[in-house]
Image (spheres, helix red, strand yellow):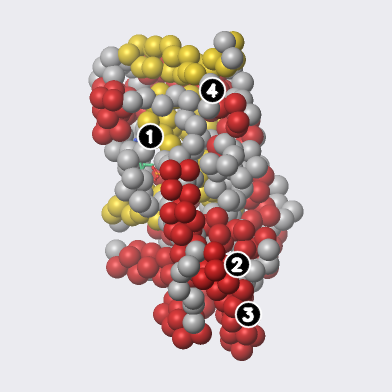
Amino acid sequence: MSNCAIVGVNWGDEGKGRMVDLLTEQYDIVVRFQGGGNAGHTVINERGKFALHLLPSGIFREGVVNVLGNGVAVDPESLVREMCEVSAQGVSLTPDNLMISDRASLLLPWHRELDELEEARLADKKYGSTKQGIAPFYSDKYQKKTVLAGELYYPEHLMEHLLSLMEWKNLTLTRVYGARPWTEEMLRQWLKTYCEVIRPYVCDTGAFLKKASAGGKRILFEAQLGSLRDLDYGIHPYTTSSNTMAAYAPIGSGLPGAKIDTVIGVVKAYSTCVGEGPFVCEMFGPEADKLREAGFEYGAKTGRPRRVGPIDIPATRYGAEVQAATEIALTKLDVLSYMDRIPVCTAYELDGKKTDRFPFPAALAHAKPVIEYFDGWGCDISSCRRWEDLPEAARNYVLYIERSIGCFIKYVSVGPERDSIIIRERN
Ligand code: GDP
């Protein structure tokens, strides 16, 4: 297990942070390789409860180096806020345990503003953005219209670069949206309040990782969101603006030649989805409210109630396939304990035909779920720590999912705490 990626198989919020927090014990370095502060990992460990948005989930382990790779949308404002929160809870952050890639692009202050303006313009056709500026950021990154974190070490060049970007961006802000323009004074304030705080953490993380890898250090790659939100493989256009795939980990982390030995795909025992877009297995009414409450399904970043449904086998199989998952961590099985019978979306009905394939995004809106029911187990399983401790009905449910998606379920999580986990051996 020298290089491992922990990735989401569904729509995000599967419990990746919880798995990274658990497994960092076996790793020296944790690297975030994509995304920004638009989602969140909730981690509960002996130090308390934390909502992480940008910081890698290895930040709680002494001796673990945490890296924000070049593929991440580094938002100095939200990063500084998060660093202050985590430090106030007793976690020490130094340039020895937190490193920001000098090649990571910075999310600029107008990206968040543009995100809000565009969602407001789209009104009832909005994408359901978290309004953290991620889509405008990545669009600008690929247009080469943002700055690299390493430019913070070249202040004169940086100011000149920022002013030229500001002049260009003010055209969109004022002429397209009728918003106020940014000024040099506002930019200087942003640099002073946020960028100067993060500058000591910015370094050549590519060189660091290359040396660490050559020296046999074990590296864990941590993703944000899940397969179905991947820019290329997800439910376009209701995706995020980056690649959430394990295959992107080497590129987005700064180790382009790295081989990922283990891909842990994190799957939730039921489905949740934040924001807009097709969600074939969605439940409504009191049944949905009960599941949402049982799993406390509210967005870690926005507090928005998550849409919920039974586990979606066609989507999960597809999600695991595109991640090339080598093993699965099934989370939140304990949440289903209240159900007498457990619904499962085993297939879709599309154009009057049953299919177990996950369809092309444009066809998803017409797909209907085929629901089957499994026996519930009718007892609390949160104290189970061995596979044999689980009631037979719970084991049957796990084994059904394993067979249906064709990937070994190594971890079964039965609670949010670090040790609420069952680890299975392959037969
Ligand atoms: P992530 O972004 O994939 O890390 O997921 P989130 O942090 O948004 O959502 C996962 C939530 O479920 C967090 O609040 C976790 O503390 C919680 N959680 C993770 N695993 C389990 C589990 O097995 N059982 C229960 N009850 N909660 C869990």
The quadrant of the image that shows the N terminus is top right
Identify which residue is drawn at 56% across, 59% down: 136
Rendered image: mark on residue 410: none
Q: Earlier in the sequence, mark 3 or mark 1?
A: 3
Tell me the kind of residue under disc 4: His
Q: Secondary structure at mark 1?
A: strand
Q: Earlier in the sequence, mark 2 or mark 1?
A: 2
Using the rendered view, name the quadrant where residue 417 is placed. top left
Cα–Cα gap, marks 4 and 2: 39 Å
Identify which residue is drawn at 61% across, 70% down: 146
Residue 21: x percent and y percent?
Answer: 43, 49
Q: Which mark's residue is nearer the viewer, 3 or 1?
A: 3
Q: Earlier in the sequence, mark 2 or mark 3?
A: 2
Task: Tell me if label 4 and label 1 are in contact, CB under 8 Å.
Answer: no
Tell me the kind of residue under disc 3: Ser
Q: Which residue is mark 2?
A: 105
Rendered image: mark on residue 307: 1
Task: Tell me if label 4 and label 2 are in contact, CB under 8 Å.
Answer: no
Q: Which residue is mark 3?
A: 164
Q: In the rendered image of this protein, does residue 106 appear above or below residue 411?
A: below
Task: Tell me if label 2 and label 3 are in contact, CB under 8 Å.
Answer: no
**Callout 4 crowding tier (Cα within 10 Å): few <14, some 14–19, many ≥20:** few
Tell me the kind of residue under disc 1: Arg
